[in-house]
Amino acid sequence: MKVAIVHYWLVGMRGGEKVLEALLDLYPDAVIVTHVYDPAQVSSRVRRHEVRETFIGRLPGAKKHYQKYLPLMPLALELMDMQEFDLVISSESGPAKGVIVRPDAVHISYCHSPMRYIWDHYHVYRARAGRLARLMMPLAAHRLRIWDVTTAARVDHFIANSSFIAKRIEKFYRREAEVIFPPVDTAEFAVSPEVGGHYLLAGEMVSYKRADLAVEAFNASGRKLVVVGDGEMREALERKSGPNITFMGRVPFAELKQQFATCKALIFPGEEDFGIIPVEVMACGRPVIAYGRGGALDTVIEGVSGVLFHEQTADALNEAISRFEEEPGLVAGPEAIRELAKGFDTAVFKEEFSAFAARALDRA
């Protein structure tokens, strides 16, 4: 059986690329198809495989400015010859599922999210874009939405990475999706015997992750907050932060694990598709205080692994933190939290995806 894995672009190693690595473990002879490939920015596990780029990868500046070529990506996918492949797995967050496969081939789309920038986050992205992009986006996004919906019909089976994404697939594509949570290497993390007196905010500092909400809440309360990560909002957030908030920037993985294991709790104020960082923190036995929408509803279980707040306001976040501090039995102990995190382990993902694919192939 010849297998292809279509991944939107390979220019770094984030959550989507971790899913790709797990799929490559399941299908070690698979060919990777992608729009843009930068070998220096991906893992050795990815580099071991044959990678075929669409024509986007040959365009000027594509490795850094690939998103500017988004309107050309549908055509680029459809020009790729996929006739040799019996099983095609598209890793969908940017354009990936639009390839044209043989009538007797099986196409499974593992959907991290329908493209946010043309659907529910469209107006946010347009408001932040430059003047020329704001003028061009309406027409480009309109055409891309039509293509995105029609190519959903090319997929035989959808898998969503969370219950939240399954609902978005149903909303935008009118297709059902089975939920298989993305892989988390829980063995990389451990419970620490010592816990500090600070809370933790970790991840990329972009608007939808709502780091600004955490800063506002901790400025008001005076509690200690450590911020790990970088992004376009960091400089502005540092300027408005009080002395109780420490920005560490990007840190080595060993230091990141230490921060996960020693914080009082992770603050997770955004609405995420799934959210791997909360599971990694839970694998260290630490609880999560999260906004009660999106992927957090699959992972942060009140009374076990954390506390949810239901309005994206500083007051609601501070009220949730106060409940966490004043009710010691509100969350379970470290070992129980870690045990819950193990349900999202890489081995679980591989077992569930492999069984799903086998059923799909049997029905073909």
Image (cartoon, rainbow, N blue to C red):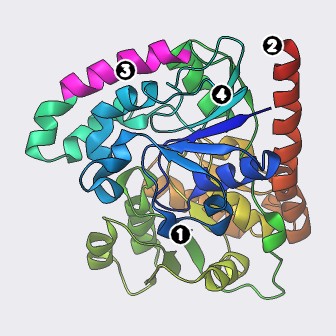
Residue range (magenta): 138-152
- On the image, numbered disc 4 is attached to which residue? 84
x and y, in percent, of residue 207 in the image: 36, 54
Left or right: 246 as drawn, with respect to 348? left
Q: Which residue is label 2 attached to?
A: 364
Image quarter in which the N terminus is found:
top right
Could you tell me how far apart the alpha carbons at marks 1 and 2 are, in whole angstroms?
Answer: 46 Å
Give whichever of discs 4 and 1 has the lower sequence position: 4
Q: Of the residues shown, which amino acid type is indicated by label 4?
A: Glu
Q: Decide: few, some or many residues near mark 2? Use Cα within 10 Å; few <14, some 14-19, many ≥20.
A: few
Labels 4, 2: front one: 4
Mark 3 or 2: the one toward you: 2
Q: Residue at x 67, y 30 (%)?
A: 88
The amino acid on which the numbered mark 2 sits, given as a three-letter code, is Ala
Depth check: 294 or 170 in front? Answer: 170
Q: Residues within 10 Å of mark 1 (few under 14, many from 20)?
A: many
Element carrying mark 3: helix
Q: Nearer the viewer, residue 304 or 1?
A: 1
Q: Check disc 1 and give the amino acid type.
A: Leu
